[in-house]
Amino acid sequence: MFSLKGVRLSLLIAGTVRAAFAAAQPTPGVPLSENFDDVTAPALPPGWVATNAQGPDPLWVTDTTFADTAPNSAHVDDPDAVSDKRLDSPPIYIMTNQAELRFQHLSQFAQGAYLSFVDGGVLEISIDGGEFQDIEAVGGHPGYDEYVPIAGAANPLNGRHGWIYEGGPFAFQEEVITLPLLGGHTVIFRWRLGSGGGDSVPVSLGWWIDSIRICDGAPCDAVPLPRKMDLDTAGNGVWEIGEQVDVAPYYYNNGGGSLDLTGVLTGITGPGYPGLYDLIDGNASYGTIPPGALGGCAFTGDCYSVHLKNTGGDRPVQHRDAQLSEQLSNGLPVTWALHIGGSFTDVPSTNQFYYYIETLFHRGVTGGCGLTYYCPVNPALREQMAVFLLKSKYGRSYVPPPATGIFADVPASDPFAPWIENLYNLGITGGCSASPLQYCPNSAVLREQMSVFLLKTLLGSGYAPPACTGIFEDVPCPSLFADWIEDLYDRQIAAGCGNGDFCPDHANTRGQMAAFLVKTFGLRLYGQ
């Protein structure tokens, strides 16, 4: 059997993956819309990154305690300790110089003695990958609280304007931020909470963020925000060559009034010769969508239908997306990416992991094991898992810091080393032995180990699962991995291996790994 390791690496390493999976063009008018309601708390949506630059855990997470739109918002605590907690958006391409950022937030930041504002929050921006700067410093108008400086000497934000605790009603408030001239630039926004310690307010609950949207050359009120899409709901959920499928988009109404919405398909294009794609039904009705609600043509029974002809011959490109253009009745054009299945010759549509493998491939988490193969029955190796986990959490464009040579069995020159060391530095793994410090990169990931890998990557190194109750016959309670395994089961990520067992010491296959990753990180095959 010949080795595919070199080919496999060329597909897994970040630079090649970014080239193979170019980012889709943003939706005109609304390049960012996020209400954090499409994930299971405390997970963040794909592409959102939480870090603690200083101070104790926890990180920013999604939370159900308070929300502008139920059930979730993003939340971070405000500890009585010096801390610097950051929440970064995915990269966003801005098309016009008339962009506006809006979000709802709720805060109770701590005060120091004599009504000094020792804790507070700011909004920062990185433009085209540059250093983060305060939005105010680049010409934005954030509406900080009366421009009162944060006064905690130990606070990393000391002396800066920001949002502070000023009493008043404990309720969500909308911030409307006119952005500087950003047309043609890619930006990342950062919500940053700084704590100074030495608080005197009895209760400092932290900061909640919700209902974030950017309106880019389009009105910001009552705009239907594209959220998700169902395809081939009567089949395996994947559009395939020769198949006619219903296309069912869903939109969220971010306005204060009801929204009557219909849509018309204006075209569909993709790899292959002209005429390969047919519009069977080009009209859809979304009915009346109440404010703050999700509406879909599936609710009215009037959706689109498209057909992909089967002409034979070779697949033109391995990662194959069609672009579906929709014109909404409110004048907003929307483009959806429709992934076409059958990407790997060794993963037929009847494979139980087919949908999950196609989703990982579409999201740029993996390019397979080489050529047109995915190797679904091969064990998932620990070196591969480092890449899979970090790309599932942070997105296809994520690039880890350079390696320094932490592990005795993973030289810094190894292509997997930056990913493995990043996982170690995030506190997700301690390796496979302490003296000498080793990672065992070519060992298979066992199912019991996978439970810890997944939940720590999702929820942070400080996460501790609930105590076990004894769900599985072959997982004693208590035992080293029992809490993690049962937490994974309770989240409906892993159902066991049958007959009341979990098979904790069995190696994960690459097919099983795909299902675990998609379920854990809420990855979608179709939609935003």
Image (tube, rainbow, N blue to C red):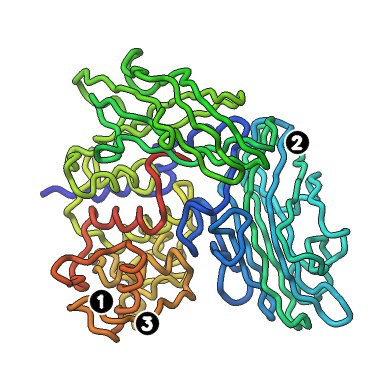
Q: Which residue is mark 1?
A: 471
- State how far apart marks 2 and 1 are (Cα): 56 Å
**Front tag of 3 and 2:** 3
- In the picture provided, is 445 more to the left or to the right than 227? left
Residue position marked by numbered label 3 in the rendering: 467
Camera-nearest residue between 309 and 150: 309
Amino acid carrying label 1: it is Ile
Please report the residue visible at 20 percent of the width from the left and 50 percent of the height from the top: 376
- Which residue type carries mark 3? Ala
User: Quick one: SS at disc 2?
Assistant: loop
- Secondary structure of the residue carrying tag 3 is loop
Secondary element at image label 1: loop
Of residues 2 and 33, which is closer to you in this image? 33
Q: Residues within 10 Å of mark 2 (few under 14, many from 20)?
A: some
Q: Quadrant of residue 67?
A: bottom right
- Identify which residue is drawn at 15% across, 66% down: 498
Q: Is residue 368 left or right of residue 183?
A: left
Image height of 251 relative to 522, above or below: above
Per the image, the residue denoted by label 2 is 181
Residue 198 in the image: above or below residue 211: below
| Mark 3 or 2, nearer chain start | 2
* x, y percent for residue 200: 78, 83
Measured Cα–Cα span from mark 3 to mark 2: 52 Å
Cα–Cα span, label 3 and label 1: 11 Å
Q: Are marks 3 and 1 in contact (CB under 8 Å)?
A: no
Question: Is any atom of residue 11 visible in this view?
Answer: no
